Image (cartoon, helix red, strand yellow):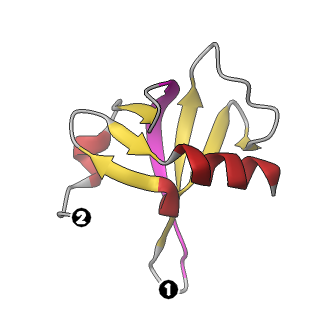
């Protein structure tokens, strides 16, 4: 994955690999000890069932290893999201 500034991610739409809207990017989570990116903080789309997601206030957390691509939108792997929701 090429390098991209976190500032350029502001308000990018997050979609899954099946084309469904997940929400809008709000922030990124990093492990303070290692500096590794661990997740995305996303304002969920109104129609998204958030019951299985890890939540923080009005936001859901998407594991960073689910990110497949960052271009005009952020694409996350549907299978990894489902696995994360089931876990």
Relative vertical location of residue 61 with respect to residue 49 in this rendering, above or below: below
Q: Which residue was labeled with disc 1?
A: 34
| Alpha carbon separation for disc pair 1 and 2 | 19 Å
Choose between 59 and 73: the one closer to the eye. 73
- Label for residue 66? none
Q: Which residue was labeled with disc 2?
A: 1
Magenta region, main secondary structure: strand
Q: What's drawn in magenta, residue-wise?
A: 20-32
On the image, the x and y values in percent for residue 23 come to: 51, 27
Choose between 11 and 20: the one closer to the eye. 20
In screen coordinates, is 3 left or right of 6? left
* Residue at the (65%, 22%) spot, across then down: 48
**Label 1: which secondary element:** loop
* Residue at the (43%, 54%) spot, across then down: 67
Rendered image quadrant of residue 19? top left
Of circles 1 and 2, the one toward us is 2
Rendered image quadrant of residue 39? bottom right
On the image, the x and y values in percent for residue 27 come to: 46, 46
Residue furthest bottom in the image: 34
Question: Could you tell me which quadrant the C terminus lies in?
Answer: bottom right
In screen coordinates, is 69 left or right of 17? left
Judge the density around disc 2: few (<14), some (14-19), many (≥20) Cα neighbours within 10 Å.
few
Mark 1 or mark 2: whose residue is earlier in sequence: 2
* Residue at the (21%, 55%) spot, across then down: 5
């Amino acid at each position: 994955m090429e390098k991209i500034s976190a500032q350029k991610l502001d308000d990018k739409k997050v979609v899954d690999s099946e084309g469904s809207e997940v929400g809008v990017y709000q922030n990124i989570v990093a492990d303070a000890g290692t500096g590794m990116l661990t997740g995305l903080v996303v304002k969920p789309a109104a129609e998204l069932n958030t019951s299985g997601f890890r939540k923080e206030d009005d936001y859901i957390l998407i594991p960073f290893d689910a990110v497949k691509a960052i271009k005009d939108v952020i694409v996350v792997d549907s299978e990894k999201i489902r696995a994360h929701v089931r876990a």
